[in-house]
Amino acid sequence: MVEPILINGRFLTRPLSGVQRYAHEIVRALSRLPDAERRYVLAVPRGAALPATLIPVRVLPGVGGHLWEQTHLARAARGGRLLSLCGAGPVGHSRQLAVIHDAAVFRHPELFWPAYGVGHRLLGRRLARRARLATVSRFSQGELAKALNLPPEVIAVAPNGAEHVHDVVPDAAVLTELDLSRRPYFVAVGNQTPNKNLAVAVRALARITDPDLRLVVVGARLGQVAKTASLADDPRVLLAGRRTDAEVAALLRHAGSLIFPSLYEGFGLPPLEAMAQGCPVIASDIAATREVCCDAALYFDPTDDAALADRMRRVMAGADPARRAAGIQRAAEYRWSRSARILDDLLASI
């Protein structure tokens, strides 16, 4: 009998962000593959929030974190295959497929607290020596290849998907809560870290005189990982904090557009989620968003708030059915099921 593949379940102890979303949805997609309940086991720390899948769960000692990965998970995976989906895993385990989502700690170390940046650069280099690597975009493939001194072709690409948004029933109560039911508004989704560049959206808003217009910022402050951005004091900016999938779906489906002003991304999941729901996207003109959105978004230089304000006015002036249709079509090309099969095939070759 072939030993089942362990899945690193540390992500189940972390708040949901883009990286954790990737892990959740890949595990769901893997669980739908033939014989998944015999081929995979989800290894989790004590106290983890367990997902509803057919994949059996194995609870290991410890409560999560890097120490849990390097000790308890490493021992449990010894001699077998391991799938780590969130950029970290046991550094000594050679029969491992590790997904590293971007090269931000290498390319933009100034965005992170020094200890975090040093630790994750060391972790990435150690994984590159022992594990098989995958990432989420062609852009990140090239970035990681340069940072880790690897040929690009040895890093597989298994992108994010968008079909999960179609399972969500929007919770329109959030529109009443935030007093948006009869107002025009834009949404920005992203944690308040400097690379998300939310300040340029606030400056762009200041260039538009409409007193009823709102900018809704969905996301948390992650001061323990990266430096936190400072947002200007504008009463039209609503800091909505973390929101449920149902609330975010309602916000996107009624918004003028999603604003995605990031300076650096490995993929950029919010634009894909927005396009899948028919929400127009205004995105920074960087390589990752160009790769994902193609011609389905409006673009602007992420340092130019005047250009962003111009795009916002264009959206407010009237609907663009052709671009909206292009966004829905583009989002449909990215599927978790396809990426799960890519990872499953790679694991079979390890």
Image (spheres, rainbow, N blue to C red):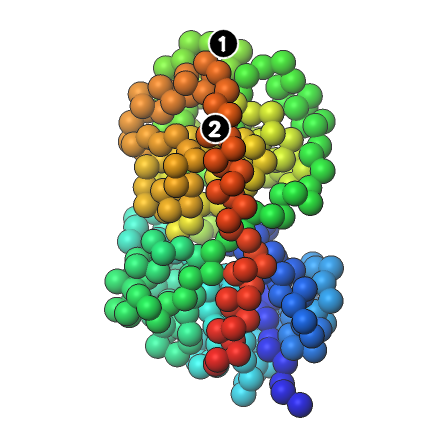
Q: CA distance from mark 2 to mark 1?
A: 29 Å
For label 1, the SS is loop
| Residue 325 percent coordinates (x, y) | 52, 33
Q: Amino acid at mark 1?
A: Pro
Mark 1 crowdedness (10 Å alpha carbons): few <14, some 14-19, many ≥20:
few
| Residue 90 percent coordinates (x, y) | 48, 75
Q: Amino acid at mark 2?
A: Ala
> Which numbered circle lies on residue 211?
1
Name which quarter of the figure residue 172 lies in: top right
| Residue 241 percent coordinates (x, y) | 57, 35
Name above or below for residue 287 compared with residue 314.
below
Residue at position x 60%, y 29% in the image: 253
Horizontal side of 147 relative to 82 (left or right) equals left
Residue at position x 55%, y 53% in the image: 335
Q: Nearer the viewer, residue 288 or 100?
A: 288
| Residue 295 percent coordinates (x, y) | 39, 37
Q: Which residue is mark 2?
A: 322
Q: Earlier in the sequence, mark 2 or mark 1?
A: 1
Quadrant where the N terminus is found in the figure: bottom right
